Image (tube, helix red, strand yellow):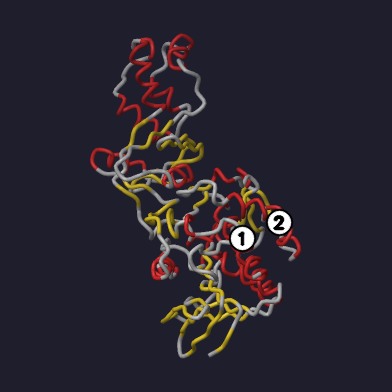
Amino acid sequence: MSDYDAIVLGAGAAGLMCAGVAGQRGRHVLVIDHADRPGKKILISGGGRCNFTNTGTVPDRFVSANPHFARSALARYTPADFLDLVEAYGIAWHEKTLGQLFCDGSARQIVEMLMAECAKGGVEVALGRPITGVDHGDGRFRVTYGERTVSAPALVIATGGPSIPKMGATGFAYDLARRFGLKVVEPRPALVPLTLGGDELLFRELSGVATEVVARAGTASFREAALFTHHGLSGPAILQISTYWRHGDPIAIDFLPGRALGWLKQLKRDAPRATVARTLGAALPERLAAALGERLALTGTLADLSDAKLAAAETQLGAWRFNPTGTQGFAKAEVTVGGISTAELSSKTMEARRLSGLYAIGEAVDVTGWLGGYNFQWAWASGVAAGQAIAAA
């Protein structure tokens, strides 16, 4: 049996970050992953260019049963810290909207950087090796993969959640956590398209149409693009709101955000001969304007319509109610809401409170960021926190 100081399960963003940090601080670390390549989800992120962080990272842009849990790790390893690492490797980058940072070249550069950081720390990486056994006794964790069994006083669960199963994602992290007595917050798909049914299927005719909206679910709201699909609704605004949406709840879409209250009545005075269809067509994609106008059933010119009818139309356009039948599931979800309960972990070290030496980081934990690089920043920050704690133990 081979002995290590730490075994990291998962060669993704959080796992590689943790291993590199611990390895460079003198710890003998092994990373094991059943995938044949490291960082497979990194490689497909951001359209292949990896949206590796967000300059607007603050704790309230993360969803968790404990909204304060992520604060410590995020404060101690910031987007600026990760950007310093990116620049140290000469990786060119650019900023898109809303603080999102991307590689100019390829997401492969981020994976190569993480592997180089691991190599600097002498980290061993075993790929294409399914794990067949994990147990604990006498203060050490034993992991069996293939024909080999290894042990260490520290074990890091960094295998992510079940989102994007075609990339090999599973609920392994939750099964392992439960085996060691840790509670798991029920996982569900997040950053995922929503499906529509019934009368709302009429919107299928708009498949491919996108427009800027404000999407709302409960108290959460996002102003970004929404996209109509054959299945329902997608686009950044919908992916964002899906994290907050619960099955059975409606969502509301403001198709004309930023309009002052009473704008239709004012337009009636300024352009009384304009029709509702023409008015909507000036602000929205033609097919969407026609569909909304048809459903509002307002014919004739603005002058023909009472102020009360215009006010009702304005209200509906500003909070068009949809009743999603569900989501497109983990197959289309970018991340997972829920996971290993933060109540079980130290927010400073990511170590399990009830089992010394056991750590959980990244998407495996009940911390989920907004779309736009936030989940990568959580992976880096939680990975660094655990790596430093392992090195200090």
Give the left or right position of residue 175, taking residue 30 as reference: left
Quadrant hosting residue 168: bottom left
Task: Using the numbered discs, state the Cα–Cα distance from disc 1 to disc 2 in whole angstroms.
Answer: 10 Å
Mark 2 surroundings: few (<14), some (14-19) or many (≥20) residues within 10 A: few
How many badges with numbers are in the image? 2
Which of disc 2 and disc 1 is earlier in sequence? 2
Residue 358 x/y as whole percent: 52, 69
* Kind of residue at disc 1: Trp
Residue 13 x/y as whole percent: 57, 65
Of residue 222 and residue 302, the one placed in the foreground of this image is 222
Query: With respect to residue 288, does 148 lie above or below?
Result: below
* Kind of residue at disc 2: Asp
Of residue 217 and residue 254, the one placed in the foreground of this image is 217
Is any atom of residue 218 visible in this view? Answer: yes
Mark seen at residue 380: 1
Mark 1 surroundings: few (<14), some (14-19) or many (≥20) residues within 10 A: many
Of residue 214 and residue 11, the one placed in the foreground of this image is 11
Determine which residue is flagged by label 2.
Answer: 81
Residue 130 x/y as whole percent: 44, 80
Quadrant hosting residue 324: top left
Q: Residue placed at 66% from the left, 77% from the top?
A: 27
